[in-house]
Image: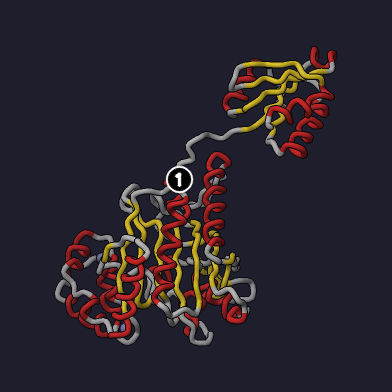
Amino acid sequence: MDILRGFKDILPQEMRKWQKLEKIARETLELFGYKEIRTPILEKTTLFSRGVGETTDIVEKEMYTFLDKSGESITLRPEGTAGAVRAYISNHLENYPFKKFYYIGPMFRYEKPQKGRLRQFHQIGIEVFGVQDPSVDAEVVYVDKIMLDKLGLTDLRIEVNNIGCPNCRPKYMKSLKNYFEKYREELCDDCKNRLNRNPLRILDCKNKTCRNIASNAPKIHEFVCDNCKTHYEAVKENLSKINVEFEENPHLVRGLDYYTKFVFEIITDKLGAQGTVSAGGRYDNLVEELGGKPTCGIGFASGCERLIELIDLGDNQSIDYYFACLEDYTTCLKLAKELADKLNKTTYIEYENRSLKSMMKKADKMNANFVVIYGKNEKEKGIVIVKDMKKSTQKEVKIEKFLENEVEKWQ
Ligand SMILES: [Zn+2]
Ligand SMILES: [Zn+2]
């Protein structure tokens, strides 16, 4: 039986990286007062068409949308923010003292599968509600960067841009449209379509010709209103004050319609073209657009699969005790239980009937610190042999003295 195209099993070999990623992310975000929220994977389709935007690639072509048995149109979430905003509204979280949230979980987009891009992928993200002050924009970038630093990622670059607001963006869109209209015939088919529906999207087209044309397109800075300008300048100032380095990228527009004023990406050059590991920005109108009271918001989302590629665990998998059991598994199980209960040590009891030699090989592959050998001879003498794999020494230990002996070792 084949797995679905664009989907992937996460196997135990890779799982330690995921556990590390999730642990460090949780610890870091909790450190700054963010609280975890888990929203459903399925939501009403309208949440995303209204939230993410009708003219975005996500809503136009990439959503897993279908009718449930009652005929309602539902969608597997393609991103985390719309669901978090919906949860904020429907649970009246404006009354909850913490206004900073984070989530970790799977997202679904029907995209062309390629290296570094899956149809089920995972994101870690945060959302902050109700803070207008530009210093929170800097906090969000800072928290994102700290999380990536703690994961051991290096050579990261932060790009920022001002994306305007519903007051000033229409003027910019108009000027973009006029500009791209001159090159209509050279644009890719997608962009010809975008030209009518949302010319902003042309700025992040990956097509080479489109990119070349876009490089001379009008810049949003010439069009933003005073409010957007003041906010953006203050964010940059705040970032500088807390020593977060960044570059301005006037073509950074993000693929979602809800962003306003400040947007950013954190990029690595180590993954080729798919270099964005985190991205986010402010969405000051989304809560209201989804039916809540006017409440501003800001957040980021990080692509877990890309982070996993960059995490270096250094050491391999390991186990504290490997039980090379040739006789009477119950005795070994009792000893393993004591190690877990009293010493909090990891153990692996071998139940496959192997020769001692092949078990020693396996213990080596597992990076076992100690091997406990229990065979016919040992059983008759009421002992186990404890082999120290790092020192290459071994010792006979009476079964009733086993725990005592091991406790001493770890002190
Ligand atoms: Zn504006
Ligand atoms: Zn294009």
Horizontal and vertical percent for residue 95? Answer: 61, 81
Left/right placement of residue 387 relative to residue 238 reads right
Say which residue appears at 79% left-offset and 31% top-offset: 333
Above or below: residue 75 compared with residue 391: below
Q: Is residue 50 visible?
A: no
Count of residue discs: 1
Ligand 2 contact, mark 1 (Cβ < 8 Å): no
Quarter of the render that holds ligand 2: bottom left
Quadrant assignment for the N terminus? top right
Q: Is residue 392 visible?
A: yes
Binning the other alpha carbons within 10 Å of mark 1 as few (below 14), some (14 to 19) or many (20 upward) gives some
Quadrant assignment for the C terminus? top right
Say which residue appears at 31% left-offset and 79% top-offset: 164
Q: Quadrant of residue 178?
A: bottom left
Nearer-the-camera pick, 192 or 259: 259
Horizontal and vertical percent for residue 240? Answer: 32, 66
Left/right placement of residue 45 relative to residue 237 reads right
Horizontal and vertical percent for residue 254? Answer: 35, 68
Above or below: residue 114 compared with residue 249: above
Nearer-the-camera pick, 23 or 91: 23
Amino acid identity at mark 1: Ile
Q: Quadrant of residue 221?
A: bottom left
Say which residue appears at 18% left-offset and 66% top-offset: 215
Horizontal and vertical percent for residue 243? Answer: 35, 61
Residue with the mark numbered 1 = 311
Say which element carries label 1.
Answer: loop
Is the image coloured rainbow, by chain, by secondary structure, or in one colour?
Answer: secondary structure
